[in-house]
Each structure stands twice: as C-alpha cells, then as structure tokens.
Image (spheres, rainbow, N blue to C red):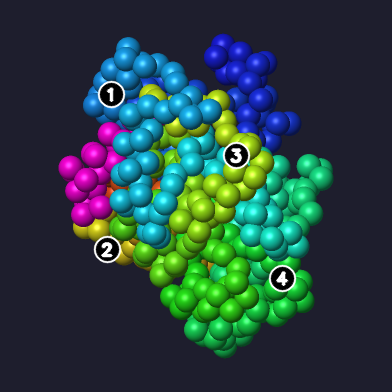
Amino acid sequence: MLTNLQARDVATVLHPYSNLATLPRQGSLILERGEGVFVYDVDGKPYLEGMAGLWCNALGHGREELVEVAAEQMRKLPFAHLFTGKSHDPAIALAEKLKELSPTPAAKVFFCNSGSEANDTQVKLVWYVNNALGRPAKKKIISRIKGYHGVTVASASLTGLPNNHIDFDLPIAGVRHAACPHHYRFGRPDESEEEFATRLAAELDAQIEAEGPETVAAFIAEPVMGAGGVIVPPETYYPKIQAVLEKHDVMLIADEVITGFGRLGEWFGSTAMKMKPDTVSIAKALSSSYVPIAGVIIPDWIDDALSRQSEKIGVFGHGFTYSGHPVAAAVALRTLEIYERENVLGHVNGLIPQFQSRLKALGGHPLVGEARGVGLVGAVEAVADKATRRGFDPKAGVAAKIVAFAQEEGLIVRAIGDAVAICPPLVITAAELDLLFDRLETALDRADQWAGAENLRAA
C-alpha cells in the first residue's frame, strides 16, 4: 500500500530515469530533510547518501553558510540577467575565480543552469566558431559509447547510451561515437591496458580519417565516465588520444560535470587524468548542488572568433534567462571559497587510499567481477561468472536488487546496468566511509544469496 505522499507523487510527478510502469506500484522514497552526508525519509529513517545526490552534493546537507549567502543575495538583488550588456558582481566574481582555477588557459565563462545545457552550448559553439573561422564543413563531434553528456537534444545525442536514443529519434546528424575505454569489458584476450589504449587511439585516428578530418571538429570526453558505469580509462589513454586530436586539428571538450571541483583529488579531473582540453563544461559540485548553475569555460581563440562573428552578425544569439543568476552565482562563489578554506581537496586526498582499498576489496566478493574507481568515485560490476566475466541476464535486474538491499540497509547507491556506482559527498569522514562500505558489503551478501536462490547464474 502506498502512503498518502507516495500516492500524490504517483498522481502528479513525472519521474526522470524511472520505470514509469512499475513506479506506481512500488512508490517513491520520499525524503524530508538532510544533515551532513545523511538524508532522512518522512518516517525519520536515515540513509547514508552514497551518491552525493546525483554526483553533486559535495559539501553535504545543512550548510547554513550557503543558505545565508543565498538569502542575503535574494534580499539585495534576487534576479538580474546578463543579456544586452548587463551584469552583476556575483557573476563577475565567479567568472574570475573559475578562470583562476581552470585546468586550461581561460578567457571567458559562459553561465547556464545544468550540465546538459553546458554541453548543448558546447555543440553550438563548435558549429558557430567553425563558421566564424571559415570552416563550414568542420562540424562533426565525436563522443564515446557509454559516455554521458546530458539529455537535451544535442547533449543526449552525444550521450552514448541506447536508452537515451531509443524512440527519442536521436542522435542528431553530425554526432559520432568512438569506442568505450573500458579495458575489463572491451579489452581483447591477453591485451594489456597499454596495448588497449594504443588500439583505441589508432581506431580513433582511423575513424577521423574515414569521416574526413576537414569535417571533424571536436571530441568530447568525461575524464572518468560517470553515468556510463564509472569507467576509468587506462593511464596512457588520454595522452594517446590527445596526439590523434592534435594531428587532425580536432578540439578536445572536457565534460567535468561530475569530476570537477575535487572528486578526483584535483580541482579538475582533466588534471588528474592527463587531459589538455580546449573547453570545459562544469556544473554539479560548482554549487554543491544547493542551487542550479553550470557553465562553459572557453579559451582566447574561441572568444576572439565569437567576438568577430558577433560584430559581423550584430549579436551573439545564445543565452538563457537564468545564465549567471545572481543567487546561484553567489552560492557557487561561496562554495568554492569553502572548498579552499576547509581544504576539501586535502581531505579528499586523505580519504582516497581508504576509499580505494575498501572498493578494491569488494572485487573479491563472489558477486563482483570488477571493482573500479579513482579518487572518491567507484563502482562494482556484478557478474554471473567471475572467470568468464559473463554478466547476468539484464531482465534479472541484479544491480537494481543490490541497490534495493542497500536502501533497506540505510545506504543510497545507484544501479547502472550491471554496475553499482558509489560517489559520496567529498566531506564524508573516515568512519562514515567505513559505514558506507559495510552497508554495501551487506547488500552484496544479500544479493548474492538471492541470486543463488533464484538460480540466476545458470548459463
């Protein structure tokens, strides 16, 4: 039986990334409040938030300082836009700070409201700039299978996941997908990670040659693939890929929506993963998710092209009502100040050995084929046969069952295919991190017993 709140939810709310057929029977988990790394449902039950919300709530809940700065800005200037030559101090100060922190030489910051909008903007800028540079044929963008870049029309096209394309009539023209850099799943027998990275770079080179280098404008990549299953590429993958891109004058777009602002122990995942991007998409931890804000960081050569084209046309015809919203900008700026003042990156680096040790230990669990991760993000992939790496029948929903058992144990994690993702708030303590992995291990034990009882390992 659904509670009153669950029934009202079913009757009114269209839920993202949910099975809309089964949700009315199951009902939603209705959350009421948050404190630190815990959230509480309407019955008062606490859950350790093992996914930082959606990879985003870096500072945890209950940060009164962020509440106060939002209230102060609302009293002072609750709204102002950046259209037609107008501006305000919060947006200016935030852009200055982001230029200072940027992993690549930065000229300007374009503000928007979500990672999807940021990556849609990246597509439009690629097209616009190449028109400005007199290269109207150089428009194709290469993403990767299992990459995730959003759900708006262009960003969902970049996303390399079938469920984001099926029956949405996507992807749009001009988007291509290269191989996924997941050695465990896609490496050949006896192929080392180094050899795998070399092969993927050669395949990308051949793909660009086949398309015609004069038609390929950009390659977009998350430093670590998030919603595709927390896929960490081989160490030499990005330097090898970068060499191919430079050979063909193809720009590199870094999607830092998940990895930006400390997740991998550096301000940006690009630095941690040896990427040298031309442009950068940011969102999520920029405001620790307290208010929606995102952006695109661009270099001088793109800024110059935009200016010349704007002079020619008379206007730069792109922007959003809430681009650089003063409340969001003020909260984001204070969030960055907290990261620095509290040495959150130092805290993260102090926890990484414990996180990775507990994560890798789960690789020995009978249900787990691979335990993978970097920094404070990871995943465990469930397999029916550890020796052959054979997965379960997708209809069995094994990862979803692990997540359900974890929720019963008071832990929120996320199922992605056969993988279970883990992405705690950056401020989690060592004791809370142990609690997270203790509860996840219990959930895996319960799922293992369930899978055996259901005879799900049968070939």
Q: Which residue is mark 3?
A: 316
- Counting residues from the start of the chain, the first of labels 4 and 3 encountered is 4
Please indicate whether residue 108 sits to the left or right of residue 250 in the image.
Answer: left
Residue 194 in the image, given as x and y percentages of width and height: 50, 84
Tell me, yes or no, whether the highlighted magenta stretch contains residue 340: yes
- Counting residues from the start of the chain, the first of labels 1 and 3 encountered is 1
Q: Which residue is mark 2?
A: 353
- Counting residues from the start of the chain, the first of labels 3 and 2 encountered is 3
Q: Is residue 68 above or below residue 350?
A: above
Residue 310 in the image, given as x and y percentages of width and height: 60, 43
The amino acid sitting under disc 3 is: Phe
Nearer the observer: mark 4 or 3; the answer is 3
Nearer the observer: mark 1 or 3; the answer is 3
Residue 421 in the image, given as x and y percentages of width and height: 48, 52
Q: Are marks 4 and 3 in contact (CB under 8 Å)?
A: no
Q: Which residue is mark 1?
A: 69
